[in-house]
Image (tube, rainbow, N blue to C red):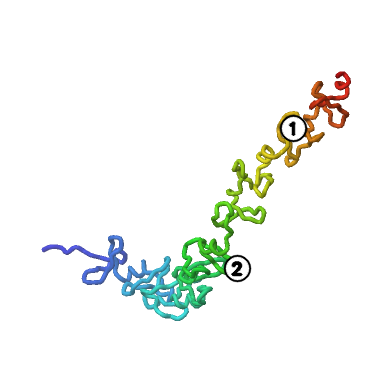
Amino acid sequence: MSIMERFDCHYCKDSLLGKKYIMKEDTQYCTKCYENLFANCCEGCSLAIGCDCKDMSYKDRHWHEKCFKCAKCSRSLVEKAFAAKDDLLLCTECYANDYSSKCTSCKKTVMPGARKMEYKGNSWHETCFLCHRCQQPIGTKSFIPKDNGYFCVPCFEKQFAYQCCACKKAITTGGVTYQDKPWHRECFLCISCKKQLPGQRFTSRENYPYCLECFSNLYAKKCVGCTKPITSLAGAKYISFEERQWHSECFSCVECSVSLVGRGFLTQRDNILCTDCGREK
C-alpha cells in the first residue's frame, strides 16, 4: 500500500488536495492565505483585490476591474486611453475638457497624445500651424514670426528679407547697410583687396568701399621724405608746403636731420634745410 504525498498550503498547512490554490515563486498557497499575504488594496474601494478579480495596475497603484473608472464621469477605463492628473485618473474626454489647451487656430481642444506645436504659451494642432504665406503646415521645420503671423523660412525670405546687393541672396540674420543698400557681412568687402570691412575702419571713393590701406595706397598723397602715403583717415599729422606733403616725423633737414616742425627752414631746389645748414650753403 503506497502513502500519498502531502500537498499543503505553505502558510496555514491545510491540505490543498482537491482545492483551488495559487502558486507564487514556486510555492503554493490556499486562496485565503494568498489574499491575506499578497493581495493589493484597491485605490477605489479600499478592499483587497481577491484572486477571483482582475487586478488593474498603474504606477504601483491597483484597482478592481469594476473600480477602474474615470474620477469625473465614472466611465470605465478598462482597455481605454486615460490620463493622470493630481493622482486622479481621467478619461481623455474629461481630461481634455478640464486641462488640455485649445488650438489657437481652430479653437478646438488639443487632445492628450495628439501631435501639437507650442510657441510662446500658445498651442496648435500640428495640422493647424500653417505658414501665413503659403498656408502649408510648418511641422518641425524652422519658422520666423512676423507681425502676429508665422512664416516658413522660404516664404519669409521671399516676402520680407532684404537681398544682398552683392550676391543677390536673402539676408536672414545680421547684415550691414551702406549707402542705403543691404549687404551680408561676409559680402561687404574692400573693392580692391576683397578684405571684409564690417568692424573695420573704411572709406569710399566713387561709391565704392575701400579699406584704409588700399585707399591710402591708391589715392593718398605721398610723403616727400619716405614716399609712403599720407592719410588723415588714419589720424596721421602732416606738413604741406608748395603742393608737397611730409609726415610730421619726416619733415626734417636733409643735411642734419633735425625736425623742422614749428621751426623756420630754407629751400634749396627740392630740398628743405634748417636755417643753420642753409646759411652754410
Residue positioned 33% across, 74% down in the render: 53
Callout 1 secondary element: loop
Q: Amino acid at mark 2?
A: Asp
Where is residue 69, by image quadrant? Answer: bottom left
Could you say where residue 131 lies in the image, as x and y percent from the top left?
51, 68
Callout 2 secondary element: loop
Relative vertical location of residue 5 with respect to residue 64 in this rendering, above or below: above
Q: For mark 1, does the 10 Å Cα neighbourhood hold few (<14), some (14 to 19), or many (20 or more) residues?
A: many
Query: Can you say which quadrant of the picture contains the C terminus?
Result: top right
Q: Depth check: 247 or 31 in front?
A: 247
Specify the farthest residue to the left.
Answer: 1
Residue under pointer 2: 147
Q: Depth check: 80 or 191 in front?
A: 191
Residue positioned 81% across, 21% down in the render: 256
Residue under pointer 1: 223
Sequence-first disc among 2 and 1: 2
Left or right side of 36 for 188? right
Q: Amino acid at mark 1?
A: Cys
Where is residue 58, by image quadrant? Answer: bottom left
Relative vertical location of residue 264 with respect to residue 133 in this rendering, above or below: above
Residue positioned 39% across, 73% down in the render: 48
